[in-house]
Each structure stands twice: as C-alpha cells, then as structure tokens.
C-alpha cells in the first residue's frame, strides 16, 4: 500500500482545499512535513486517520485530543456560512495505491453553526477505485475492505507519534505489547471463537439437564456443576494471571525507581566528590596565581639581564687589571710593616724611608679598598640578582604550566558537575526506604499469587479428571434416553471444538510472540549496532527481556534512548508481521527521543517501510543535522505556515 | 492476494485437526467472528454458533443412522 495524495477541505486550521502529494519512490521513500507547534502538523496526522477510519477514529480523537469531530470544522468556513445558513462541508480524502489499483477514500461531514453548537446535518464515507481515465467505481463495505489492507486494530503500529515510542519504552507496557501481537495476527478472532463455543457448550449442557430424568439427570447435574466449577476455577486463574502481570509491572516500575534511586545516590556521591575536588583545585589555583604574581615581579626584571651581564664583564675586567683591589695587598703590606722585612729581603726600621713608603702605600690601599669594596659588593650582588631572576623565570614557567593544568582540570570538573546536575534534575524524590519496603511487599504478594495459582492449577487438574469420569458415566446413562444423547452430542462437539481452538490459539500466540521477538531483536540491533552483545527479546509474558553477556537482566542498564529504540523496533516489527507493508506515518518522531539515539534512528528511518511520512518540528527535529541524514532519501518537503491573524494554515512546498 | 505468512501458519495448525466435524465447526465459527469483527460484541449472533454445532451434530446422527441401516 502506498499513499499518493491527501486533500483537506475546511479541516481544522486548513481553510478551503489543500493538497499534499506523497510522490515517494524506492530511492526516496520519505515525505517530510515541517510545522511549528500549533501550525497544523497533528491535524494532518488526524486527517489521514480520519480519512481512513472515519467514525471509528472519532472516539480516539475524543480520548486523546479531547475534541469531537465537529471541533475540527474550520472556524472561518463556519463564519462564512453563518449568515446564509448554509452548512460547511469538511472533508478529507486519501488517495492510495494497493496491489496495482488506485483508490480514493473520503470522509465528509456537513456542519452548521447552531447558536453555540456545531451540528452535523449529513455525513458520507466513500471508497472508490479510480482508473487513470478518471472513472470511479464504488467499493461497498468500506470497513471490510480496509480491514483486509490496513486493519484499524493495528492502526497504532502504522500511524503513531513520538509519545507512543516513549510510552512503550516505559515499564508496565507488557499488556500493550501483548495486545499488539494478538491484534496483528488476529488472535482476538480465535480468542472470541473459543468463548462463543464455550457458551454454546454451556447452553447445550443446560438443555441436557432439562430433558434428562432419574439417575441420568443426577449425573448430568454433577457433570454440569463440575463444568461450572471448572469455569470458575479457570476464571480465578485468569484473574490471578492478570494480577500477576499487574504486580510484575508494578515491581518493574518500582524496581526501576529503586534502581534510579540507587543510581541517583551514586550520582550524588560522585557530585559531592567532584565538588570537593573542585574546591581543592580552586584553592590550589588561587595559591598558584598569588605565587605567579610575586614571581612574575622578579621575572619581569629579566629585561635587565643583558645590562647586568655587561656590567659584570666590565667589573671582571677591572678586577683583572687590579683597578679593584683585593684584600691580599692590604694584609701583605700590614705583614711586611709588622715583621719590618720586605719581600725582596730588605730590612727596615720604623720611621725610615722604606717604612714610610710602605705605610703610605698601605694608606692608599686602604683608601682604594673602601672604594673597591662597594664595587666588589655590587659585583657579587649582581651575580645573586641574576641567579634570582633566572630562578624566577624558570619558576614562572612551571607555575604557568601548573595554572594551565589546574584550570583545565577545574573546567573538566565543572563540565562533569554540570552533566551530573542535569542527570540529577529529574531524579526520583521518593524515600528509598519506603520504595524498598513497597518493593518487598509487592514481591511477597507476587509469591502469594504464584502459590495461589499453583493451588488452583492443581484443583483444575482434579476437576478435569472428575469431569472425565462423570462424562463416561453420563455417556453410558445417556444412551438410555435418546433426547439426552442428542444434547450430549452437541455439548461434546461445542466443548471439544472450544478446547481444540484454545490449543490452536495458544500455539499460534506463542509462534507469533516468537516471530515478533526475532524481528524486534533484529531491528534493535540495526538501530543500536553497538548493543549487539546484549541478548534482546520479548519473554513469554510479553515483557522486554534484555540480558547481558553473562545472562544477567540488563533492561535497566539500557539508556532511556536505547529503551526507546527497543520500543520502536517492537512497533515496526508488528508492522512487518502484519505483512500489509503499509506506509509509516510518524508525528514528531524525535519529539521525545533521547539525543543519544537520534542519529541511529534517523539513519534507519527511510528503510523502515516502503513509504515513510514524517511530521516534524522545525529546529529541534528538522535541523541541519537531521536534514543531512534524511534529505537525500526525501522526495518532498512541505512547510506548514500558520497565519496568526486569520488562524489558518497554508501548505508550502519546501 | 496471497495468504500472509501468519495466516498460512494458522491454516497449518487448523489442518492438523483430525476430527472433521470439529474442523468444520471451528472454521465456521472463526469465519462468523471475522464477519462481525468490526461490530460490537452485543451484536454477535450467538444463536448461529449453536446452529453450526447443531448442524454438524445432525450430520453425525444421520451418518450413524445410515451406518446402523
């Protein structure tokens, strides 16, 4: 089946007639309709559904959108006709191709404003086959025809929205998963058939009892009562099974919260640790910055290093030349004057010429010394200063490196903290102790239910044996009375047919579950190639069943996005099992989808069905990124433009 | 229109029913259920299920009588 064209006339915000063509091909199987919030995107989704299913879809509109079909009649069109008293025709037509033939299905209502109410004066629902020459042939029994090609009971698996993907990813969805499988392979037909046959058997048993006499009547009475008891037991067992499913779902929900809580506690601990580490690093950084300031002052004097080097050189040369005295010449002169003997061997006395000459030289040396010492001090001070500057420069390099590392570490810690804060924003606020107690309580209830169910199953076995024994006796006695035998035959036929159909139902249900399970797994791996190490399935009780490599339950380890991918895999597998190959129409596919899976799902979307129609929000859904993934596989892009003043939507080809 | 895989599987299970009378009853009841699938459960003709069973019972009785003769 392939949609070809949708026309809307005075439907919702679409005043007058609007057409959207779906000219998809094998290479470009997608049509994208882009519209902001309130611009008429979901109205198109509703229009497709209404065109196909007419009055069957109207209760869905009331339940989901709290709108009756008359609320969809365009306001402006109603105002236009208010004066004349003529009605407004609101219509949606969907043109489609199925197995080489072309059809048009149309729903229309004629509505009038009557004071505050909008009243429907007439409505039509029509399906036509049309030829390229424009000839139309009426197709009677629209519902029967559509049930064959696109059954309304599995509509939710072909036409759905992002909310549905998210909802099916949440704990407690096993009933919906089971319903989907039952519906898609018509298991409901078999289930209902079993019930009708059981009802017929009951009726024939009642007839038998009424017409039998004496011992036959007595045994027949016991036989009928045993059947009634068996039915009661089976009803109780079914009730317990439902209770068990409800309890398991509750346990799943609370277990999920519990695990989230544990995760939250771990995240909070991690956050505290990061906050402490961040504070310590910030204190370190403060200290390093202070040290940098002080060291930088010294290091900044590095610009005078060349001058210092030059001065040191000049002073060194002066020392070499003896222009700067050393303390040796002073102490030598003092020693010579003390021993009264020159180094050349000449002896002298105090007061003679040599003594006076040497005393004069000593005096000159002492005078020189006082001047030279300053220069010597300067010489050594310059060396020390130079060493300090170089040390400061080297330290400054180390400190800058340390500061850069600390700043990076702090930025990284802040980023981690921000992520943690985001994760903790939606964390459960229940008391973990209460959750734990509730979980224990539910688990205990579940154990009791399982024990009760075992007890009832035992009683059922016993009752079935009793029925068999009574049946033999009843048949033996029944031969005596012709009319009784006749009714017994009918009871037996109905009962055995019901049992045989029940057996087929159980086998078929299990086969179908298994088939959906295989397809769901395959599709999930296509969405999430990195999760191939996980074993993914749908268990006998229709819960998602995910196990890690060691065979341990791992559903709760999946990210929210991965769970959504699993639910989308399930939805599309239902569509595949149906073998109807219908178009997939998804309203806001990425609306509730986690970012971590958006790319994988967007990449896979064009291959999910032979035709995919997406209704997307600009920006958050239809953006440069998704366009780069989807544009090459998209045949047409339509933009919905909404005029605030006239409250009308126009469809513009993008 | 070729039969979907799921219908083929169902048919295969149905073929395995050995008792022809049971097979006939089941096929007619499921067919009746299919006919009324879009209608409300209240509208389902329960009497017709009893008639289907009765009709098969009559055939068995007829065959039994023929066998006796």
Image (cartoon, coloured by chain):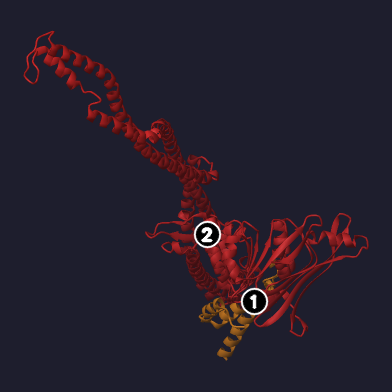
Chain colours: A red, B orange
Classify mark 1: helix, strand or loop: loop
Q: Position of residue A360 (x, y in %)?
A: 20, 14
Split into 4 quadrants, where in the image is the N terminus of chain A? bottom right
Q: Residue at x 73, y 63 (%)?
A: A58
Q: Residues within 10 Å of mark 2 (few under 14, many from 20)?
A: some
Frontmost residue, A7 versus A327: A327
For label 1, the residue is A1
Q: Is residue A445 left or right of residue A62?
A: left
Q: Residue at x 58, y 70 (%)?
A: A606
The answer to whether residue A187 shows anywhere in this view is: no
- Marks 2 and 1: in contact by CB < 8 Å? no
For disc 2, the chain is: A
Question: Which sits earlier in the primary sequence, circle 1 or circle 2?
Answer: 1
Split into 4 quadrants, where in the image is the C terminus of chain A? bottom right
Q: Is residue A259 left or right of residue A86?
A: left
For disc 1, the chain is: A
For label 2, the residue is A597
Frontmost residue, A549 versus A287: A287
Please, which residue is most extreme toward the front here? A353
Residue A149, quarter of picture: bottom right
Label 1 to label 2: alpha-carbon separation? 29 Å
Classify mark 2: helix, strand or loop: helix
The answer to whether residue A652 shows anywhere in this view is: yes
> Which labelled disc corresponds to residue A320?
none
Frontmost residue, A362 versus A623: A362
């Amino acid at each position: 089946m392939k949609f070809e064209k949708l026309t809307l006339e005075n439907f919702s915000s679409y005043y007058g007639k609007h057409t959207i063509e779906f000219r998809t091909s094998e290479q470009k199987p997608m049509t994208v309709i882009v519209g902001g919030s309130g611009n008429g995107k979901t109205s198109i989704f509703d229009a497709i559904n209404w065109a196909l299913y007419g009055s069957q879809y109207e209760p869905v509109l009331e339940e989901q959108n709290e709108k009756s079909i008359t609320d969809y009649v365009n306001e402006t069109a109603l105002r236009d006709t208010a004066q004349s008293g003529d009605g407004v025709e609101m219509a949606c037509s969907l043109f489609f191709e199925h197995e080489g033939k072309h059809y048009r299905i149309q729903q229309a209502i004629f509505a009038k404003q009557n004071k505050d109410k909008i009243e429907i004066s007439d409505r039509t629902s029509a399906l036509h086959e049309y030829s390229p020459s424009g000839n139309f042939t009426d197709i009677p029994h629209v519902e029967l025809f559509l049930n064959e090609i696109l059954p309304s009971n599995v509509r939710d698996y072909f036409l759905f929205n992002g909310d549905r993907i998210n909802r099916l990813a949440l704990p407690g969805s096993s009933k919906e998963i089971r319903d989907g499988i039952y519906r898609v392979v018509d298991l409901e037909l078999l289930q209902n058939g079993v019930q009708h046959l059981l009802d017929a058997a009951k009726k024939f048993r009642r007839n038998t009892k009424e017409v039998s006499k004496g011992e036959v009547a007595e045994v027949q009475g016991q036989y009928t009562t045993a059947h009634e008891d068996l039915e009661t037991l089976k009803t109780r067992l079914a009730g317990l099974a439902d209770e068990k499913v409800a309890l398991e779902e509750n346990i799943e929900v609370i277990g999920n919260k519990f695990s989230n809580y544990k995760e939250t506690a771990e995240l909070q601990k991690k956050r505290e640790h990061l906050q402490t580490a961040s504070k310590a690093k910030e204190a370190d950084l403060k200290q390093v910055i202070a040290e940098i300031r002080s060291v930088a002052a010294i290091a900044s004097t590095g610009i005078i290093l060349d001058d210092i080097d030059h001065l040191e050189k000049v002073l060194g040369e002066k020392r070499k030349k003896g222009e700067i005295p050393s303390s040796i010449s002073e102490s030598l002169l003092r020693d010579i004057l003390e021993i009264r003997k020159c180094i050349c061997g000449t002896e002298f006395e105090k007061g003679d010429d040599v003594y006076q000459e040497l005393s004069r030289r000593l005096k000159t040396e002492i005078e020189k010394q006082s001047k030279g010492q300053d220069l010597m001090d300067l010489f050594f001070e310059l060396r020390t200063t130079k060493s300090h500057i170089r040390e400061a420069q080297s330290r400054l390099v180390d400190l800058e490196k340390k500061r850069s590392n600390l700043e990076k570490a702090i930025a990284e810690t802040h980023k981690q903290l921000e992520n943690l804060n985001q994760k903790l924003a939606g964390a459960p606020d229940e008391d973990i102790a209460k959750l734990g107690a509730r979980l224990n309580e539910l688990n205990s209830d579940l154990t009791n239910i399982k024990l009760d169910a075992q007890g009832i199953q035992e009683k059922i076995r016993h009752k079935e044996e009793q029925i068999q024994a009574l049946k033999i006796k009843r048949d033996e006695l029944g031969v005596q009375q012709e009319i009784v035998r006749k009714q017994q035959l009918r009871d037996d036929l109905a009962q055995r047919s019901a049992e045989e159909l029940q057996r087929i139902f159980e086998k078929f249900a299990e086969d179908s579950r298994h088939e959906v399970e295989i397809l769901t797994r395959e599709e999930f791996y296509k969405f999430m190639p990195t999760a191939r190490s996980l074993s993914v399935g749908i268990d006998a009780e229709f819960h998602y069943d995910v196990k890690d490599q060691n065979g341990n339950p791992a559903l709760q380890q999946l990210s929210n996005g991965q769970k959504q991918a699993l639910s989308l895999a399930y939805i599309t597998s239902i569509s595949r099992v149906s073998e109807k190959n219908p178009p997939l129409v998804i309203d806001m596919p990425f609306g509730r989808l986690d970012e971590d899976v958006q790319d994988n799902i967007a990449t896979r979307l064009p291959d999910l069905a032979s035709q995919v129609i997406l209704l997307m929000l600009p920006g958050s859904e239809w953006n440069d990124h998704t366009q780069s993934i989807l544009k090459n596989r998209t045949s047409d892009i339509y933009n919905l433009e909404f005029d605030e003043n006239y409250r009308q939507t126009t469809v513009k080809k993008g | 229109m070729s039969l979907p895989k799921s219908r083929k599987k169902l048919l295969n299970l149905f073929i395995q029913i050995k008792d022809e009378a049971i097979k006939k009853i089941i096929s007619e009841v499921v067919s009746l259920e299919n006919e009324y699938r879009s209608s409300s459960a209240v509208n389902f003709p329960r009497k017709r299920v009893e008639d289907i069973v009765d009709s098969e019972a009559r055939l068995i009785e007829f065959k039994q009588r023929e066998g006796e003769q």
